[in-house]
Amino acid sequence: MTTPSTIAESMLARERDSLDLAEFDREIEESKGHIYTHAERVPLAKLNDWYEEPDSGWLRHRSGKFFSIEGLRFSLPEAPVSAWCQPIINQPETGILGILVKEIDGIVHCLMQLKDEPGNCNGVQLSPTVQATRSNFTGVHGGRSVPYLEYFREVRTDQVLADVRQSEQGAWFLRKRNRNMIVSTMDEIPSRDGFRWLSVGHVLWLLRQPDLVNMDSRTVLSVLPFAVDAGRTGSAAGDPFTSALVSSCDARARTRHADRQIQSWISEGRSKNDATVEPVPMDALTRWRRSAESIQHDTGQFFEVIGVRVESAGREVGQWTQPMLATKEDGLIGLLVTTIDGVLHVLMNLRAEPGLVDVAELAPTVQCTPGNYEHLPPSARPVFLEEFLTAKPEAIRFDSVLSDEGGRFYRVRNRHLIVETDTVYQHPDYRWMAVHQLRDLLRHSHYLNVQARSILVCLYSLLVDRA
């Protein structure tokens, strides 16, 4: 049976060269012939089975399921921008994001799905074994059943390696959560078209490929349990940075702040925060303009609510229409790292967002769309943004553009950037934390936001960079 120790050994194993990247790229390209999702922009007014609620102007599906686009007013008195209005996605159901794992020839492998989403900018990406909303797996769409769902809904507890509800994008989803699961099996899994066993090291390595490992896979991989013994593996790391990263993953490593201090800081930040969230009609959204085509801010910044018509192959349903959120610029998810007493630490920000269940969660050092700040006061600019915009090449440890969630967001991408610094910055809204402290928090809900989980997996990927 797969254990945290065997997962760590598989991550650190020097076996990724057995994956022929050129051949794998050809496999991905060939899959696009029978796995595809073609999305065409259409006016919001032309969406089939969607209607505008008479009193509120909110967009709803006629089934009463799936999701709705609603209006929201958010107040955050202590922030540089203390209040604003916006549309937000309300999807009050918990979906399943699950990866099935199995040891093959002594190496832990993940069953990954080759899946296209209407919002993907390049077609097929690596998705979890199961990636389904409750509306999907209960058959509201009237389509085919979800493959491998039984491994996650009818599972023995001793097969569950991770099972935790985590938040989605708190700026765009209202209190949306998904069940993130990793389940181990020793069964002979029947072969299905569109699925591929890849070692855990290979999946992490493929994060270097732009727009390949999707957001749902990244959030599930962030809760992957692995046990690292720095005393046994750190000396073989080959360079000081990797050695410090290995030490940071070891639960016995020293940390700048004790766990109880981190917990108290988070609790205090949440308790003193006077954030309020108020649902409002669409016509009450200040500076947002509704037309038959879309809903957008009068500056043209932030995001836009658009309509799409979708035709697909290799999915449960062949065609549909829906609203989606779109941006005009790639975002930035940045993580500052530094070594303290031989242990790599990452700089985390306690960040409030309108859609979070518990007001604030730990976020990356920087999480923003830089162009959005052109119309805001300088004090609203992220504190450490310049550290990433002016980073020297030798300080950049990871740099890849990865897609955001493709089911609700249209071609939204974020540059994932990990930058090493010699400065141990201090700021009341930030704390330096070891990797093992973040992994401990990930065993519980609502501590790390989805952007933090995404960049954390990119940091994990540096453990396999050991050619």
Image (cartoon, rainbow, N blue to C red):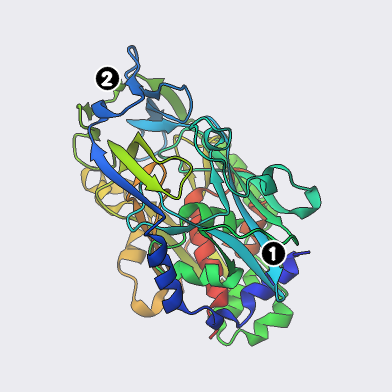
Give x and y (percent) for residue 52.
Answer: 32, 19
Nearer to me, 359 or 272: 359
Using residue 134 as the reference point, say whether residue 305 is left or right of it.
Answer: left
Q: Quadrant of the N terminus?
A: bottom right
Q: Is tag 2's residue or tag 1's residue first in the polypeptide sequence?
A: 1
Where does label 1 land, which residue?
102
Displayed quadrant of residue 112: bottom right
Using residue 82 as the reference point, say whether residue 336 is left or right of it.
Answer: right
Badge number at residue 121: none
Using residue 222 as the reference point, say whether residue 122 is left or right of it.
Answer: left
Using residue 109 as the reference point, say whether residue 158 is left or right of it.
Answer: right
Element at badge 2? Answer: helix
Where does label 2 land, which residue?
283
Nearer to me, 378 or 399: 399
From this viewpoint, is residue 431 visible? Answer: no
Displayed quadrant of residue 440: bottom right
Is disc 2 surrounded by few (<14), some (14 to 19) or many (20+) residues within 10 Å? some
- Disc 2 versus disc 1: nearer the observer: 1
Q: Three-letter amino acid code at disc 2?
A: Asp
**Is 431 located above or below residue 10 in the figure?**
above
Outermost top residue = 55
User: Which residue is at a point 51% across and 72% down the rendered structure image?
Assistant: 205
Element at badge 1? Answer: strand
From this viewpoint, is residue 37 visible? Answer: yes
Nearer to me, 397 or 96: 96
Give x and y (percent) for residue 76.
Answer: 42, 33
Give x and y (percent) for residue 88.
Answer: 39, 32
